[in-house]
Image: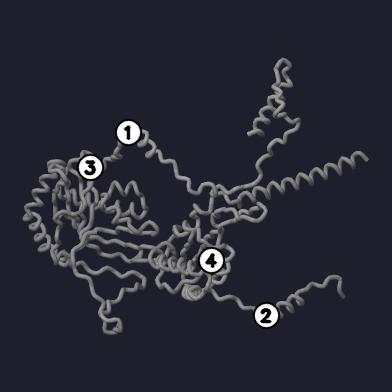
Amino acid sequence: MALSMRRTLVSLHRTCQSYKNVEVPLDLHHPVPFYLPVRTKKRYFIPPAVGLKGKKQWDPVAKARAAGIVIKQENMERPINIACTAGIFDPYIPPEGDARLSSLSKDGLKQRTEQLRQSASSQLAIRKIKEHDSTFTTKSFAEQAQEIFIEAHSALTDFNKEKLHSLVTERCYPEMTRGNRYKTIRWRFIESLEPPRVVHARCPDMVTKGNLYGQVTVRMHSKQTLAIYDRFGRLLLGSEEQPKDVLEYLVIERHLMNLYGRWRLHGKIVPSWAPAKDPIIKTVAIPGPEMEEPGQEFDPLNYEVPKPQAVQWYK
Amino acid sequence: MYSSLIHRYCCLGLKSLCVMLQSRLAAVSVTQHLHTSSSLLSKQWAKKNLQLFPPQQLHEPRRPAEVHHSRRQIKYSKDKMWYLAKMVRGMSIDQAVSQLEFNDKKGAKIMREVLLEAQEMAVKNHNVEFKSNLYVAESFSGKGKYLKRIRYHGKGMYGIMDKVYCHYFVKLVEGSPPEAERRTGYDQAQDYVEGLKARTVIHGL
């Protein structure tokens, strides 16, 4: 304390030297020395983490509460627009002989046109759709559906996200694109073997009663080529030259209540009797069966790989 | 005389200019190799896993699958980790894992975990058919972010103690490990004799 007092006195003395009429306080008990060492610049380095041990972070919420300030809780609300349904309501179950009967043109076609007329709920649904969309007809819609399908898959090969979102619903988009980001897909639509047909229609409503969505199932038989290459450019599945005949049941959906709603691909129905797909060009290890006793040995020769059940599923 | 003096000065000037230009060029190339981003946050090694190759033609040889994996801020010295990384380089994955399992060093346990993680990633995400058909193509350690502490010495002296951390990077490639070229003494002798034979004799008879 004495040193600091002396320092201030010294600085005062120095400033007073320039002014002639200022009185300098002369202290006999604490004389000011003529020469005082000035503090040099700090040169040693202390790591910053040393001093921080035990120091708590300044908590503004606790301080405000202690001071008595009340802040209104702002709920972060964000409205979400649901533009598509979560699944396929009342799905169409394709009859077993559908793929085989198509070759017999007269009988097969007659059967199927009768089926469509018989299903009353489909007719009701088509009528409801026509109320909201005046230009809807089953014949024109089938062609439109095929065009949507072809455009959506070509957008998938180019991975054009904006175009794909406009052609495909939000439920279908992750199913189409999952795992495909680091793969190259080459797909080509060669020709349609049969004209596409509307086989099923439903008009479910979500959450509130009037919120109508229209789901129409279209059957199409066509020739396509598909080749998927992995990240390193090696063929994973299919081939580019060999075309395949594909029978598909597409579900196209539209939010009827929405003025700007568009018909978009919502999903595919894979019937239980569909033929097995080609295997991938890769060896995969299947997990073996669980042994009841610890010492039991696994006999690979007599073991039969369990086959999955033939169930209709939705892509 | 004056012209010769001027000529000499001009030459000197040109030489110094050249030297300056060379040093400037060197400075430019040096700045390109400076560490501009911190290694903790840089994901350059992991980004190599996101590289997409175009589909191969039929006449091209099959491209082997590659997996890049790393672990950051391992509490171990980078110099000590280097010994293990050097040991593992060029080994097949099974051999590497088994060697590290019976190594007494602290880094060996961590390195083994990293290699097993990378193997699993390769099979699950990168379309590698057989998990044993991998070998360690690249393996190295790097310096992590150190914590600094005071080490107290006598007489009020102190030192700054570094708490060392390191990163470990590994690249697994599909296929059998490449055979290391073995040069025998006979090969070396052959090369020497051929070198002697290939000499050109100038001003000889």
Q: What type is the residue that disc 1 sits on?
A: Val
Left or right of A194, for residue A299: right
Label 3, residues with CA under 10 Å away: few <14, some 14-19, many ≥20: some
Which mark identifies residue A261? 3
| Amino acid type, callout 2 | Asp
Q: Let me know if residue A300 appears in the view.
A: no
> Element under label 1?
loop
User: Residue beneath label 4, please?
Assistant: B139
Marks 4/1 same chain: no
Q: Are marks 3 and 4 in contact (CB under 8 Å)?
A: no
How far is disc 1 from disc 2 in space, using C-alphas? 87 Å
The spot of residue A269 in percent (x, y) is 20, 59
Q: Position of residue A255 (x, y in %)?
A: 20, 44
Which numbered mark, 3 or 1, is in the foreground of this view? Answer: 1
Q: The disc numbered 1 marks a residue on which chain?
A: A
Quadrant containing the N terminus of chain A in the rendered view: top right
Question: Given the image, on which type of amino acid does mark 3 rest?
Answer: Gly
Q: Is tag 3's residue or tag 1's residue first in the polypeptide sequence?
A: 1
Judged by depth in the image, the label closer to the viewer, 4 or 1, is: 1
Label 3 to label 1: alpha-carbon separation: 46 Å
Quadrant occupied by the C terminus of chain A:
bottom left
Q: Mark 4 and mark 1: span between their CA atoms?
A: 57 Å
Q: Is residue B131 above or below residue B10?
A: below
Q: Which mark is residue B187?
A: 2
Callout 2: residue from which chain? B
Q: Which residue is mark 1?
A: A70
Instruction: Check disc 3 and report its element: helix, strand or loop.
Output: loop
